[in-house]
């Protein structure tokens, strides 16, 4: 069973957000995107050359910066 961050998670694996460790700014930004602890997500693509992490949640695709993705803890469902 995988437990890690969004940045280190395998592509196209069903994941659940278990913790957000980025402080108030990250929590606010994720709430604006409609992402909360307990939500199921899937990493669709890791852009090359330090680009964003593309995830899917609730039928929406969301691009997150790598610093944000590194602070979101997930586990495989």
Image (spheres, rainbow, N blue to C red):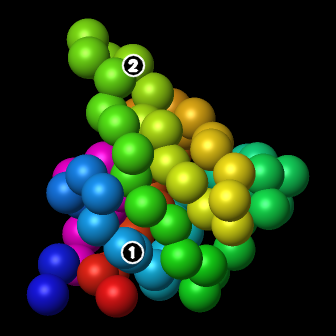
Counting residues from the start of the chain, the first of labels 2 and 1 encountered is 1
Residue 74 pos. (x, y %)? 38, 74
Q: Which residues lie in the magenta part? A: 3-8
Q: Residue at x 80, y 62 (%)?
A: 34
Vertical arrangement, residue 17 with respect to residue 23, above or below? below
In the image, 60: left or right of 50? right
Asked if labels 1 and 2 touch by Cβ distance under 8 angstroms, the answer is: no
Label 2 vs label 1, nearer the camera: 1
Q: Position of residue 3 (x, y in %)?
A: 22, 78
59 displayed left or right of 6: right
Residue shown at the point (34%, 23%) measured from the top left: 47
Provide residue 38's location: percent of width, then percent of height. 59, 86
Q: Can residue 58 be seen in this view?
A: yes
Q: Which quarter of the figure is the N terminus placed in?
A: bottom left
Near mark 1 (Cα within 10 A), the count class, few <14, some 14-19 or many ≥20, is many
Say which residue appears at 50% left-offset and 67% top-offset: 41
Which residue corresponds to the image point at 48% horizontal and 38% vertical from the top-left?
54
* Alpha carbons under labels 2 and 1: distance apart: 21 Å
Q: Dot 2 corresponds to which residue?
A: 51
Q: Residue 29, labelled with which disc?
A: none
Q: Measured along the vertical axis of the image, is residue 6 above or below residue 69?
A: below
Q: Residue furthest front?
A: 59
Query: What mark, if any, has residue 15 been given in the picture?
Result: 1
Front in this rendered view, residue 17 or 62: 62
Q: Nearest the camera: 44 or 20?
A: 44
Magenta stretch containing residue 20, yes or no? no
Near mark 2 (Cα within 10 A), the count class, few <14, some 14-19 or many ≥20, is few
Residue 4 point in image, percent of width and height: 24, 69
Q: Splitting the image into 4 quarters, where does residue 39 fall?
A: bottom right
Vertical side of 63 occupied by 68: above or below: below
Check disc 2 and report its element: helix, strand or loop.
loop
């Amino acid at each position: 069973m995988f437990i890690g961050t969004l940045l280190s998670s395998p592509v196209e694996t069903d994941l659940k957000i278990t913790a957000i460790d980025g402080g108030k700014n990250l929590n606010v930004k994720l709430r604006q995107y409609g992402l909360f602890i307990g939500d199921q997500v899937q990493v669709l693509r890791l852009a090359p050359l330090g680009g964003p992490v593309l995830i899917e949640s609730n039928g929406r695709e969301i691009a997150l910066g790598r610093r944000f993705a590194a602070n979101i803890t997930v586990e495989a469902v």
